[in-house]
Amino acid sequence: MNKSVASIGALALLISLTLTGCSGQSKPETSPSTNNEVEVDVPDSEIPVEDSFVDGVLTTSDLTITITDYKVIPVGGVGNEYGEVPVLAIWYETKNLGTSDRDITPGEFLWEFEAFQDNNPDFENQLEVGLHPDDSLLDTQDAIIKAGRTLENAFSYELSDTITPVELVAGRFGDEIGRMTFNLK
């Protein structure tokens, strides 16, 4: 029995010495470098775009929305035939920049903008969405815009009055990107 234990012990010692010798790794020698900078050319289309809303143009990484026109439409006027209050109608173009896999539609306007009319001293007056003001654009309001292409559409907000300016605020995920003022008179 002692011979077996001694043989097993010798074998274990031999294996552990062999494995220890195998685990010793040599470090590769590195020579000091004086310049760690690498220059890489990145195409302009791959440079991230910072979101902005300037001069009526909202630019994000995947779309642009350009405001082209606006007007106040009274109750019963063309574009507000069924409304109960005057509306601010806004015409715009949405361009799919082709940088995203998600579907881009003219309806993005609803997700990108909120409208306010500061005519109450006690609370922030966010305007309600009105009926679509332009029958000629109804068929494309939910159309998926192809990459690199643009579709025109319109949107309206129900006004509290027809005198106080409206602030259109562009934002994403709760962060304000910019704002535009519409003077009604």
Image: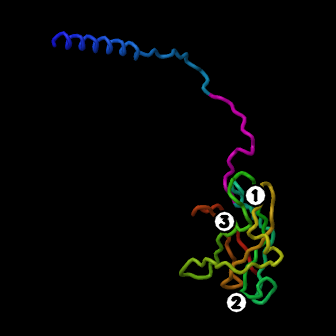
Identity of the amino acid at label 3? Glu
- Horizontal side of 4 relative to 143 (left or right) equals left
The residue indicated by pointer 2 is: 84
Determine crowd level at label 1: few under 14, some 14-19, many 20+ residues with C-alpha closer than 10 A.
Answer: many
The residue indicated by pointer 1 is: 96
Q: Is residue 183 magenta?
A: no
Residue 184 rendering spot, x and y as whole percentages = 74, 79
Q: Nearer the viewer, residue 128 or 140?
A: 140
The picture quadrant where one finds residue 90 is bottom right
Determine crowd level at label 2: few under 14, some 14-19, many 20+ residues with C-alpha closer than 10 A.
Answer: few
The picture quadrant where one finds residue 80 is bottom right
Residue 74 rendering spot, x and y as whole percentages = 76, 87
Mark 3, secondary structure of its residue: helix
Vertical position of residue 56 compared to residue 81: above or below: above
Identity of the amino acid at label 2? Glu
The region drawn magenta spans 37-52
The residue indicated by pointer 3 is: 112
What residue is drawn where x is 70% and y is 61%?
53
Residue 47 rendering spot, x and y as whole percentages = 70, 44
Kindly indicate whether the residue at mark 1 contacts the one at mark 2 (C-beta within 8 angstroms): no
Q: Label 2 vs label 1: CA separation?
A: 34 Å
Label the magenta part by its dominant secondary structure: loop
**Furthest residue to the front?**
1
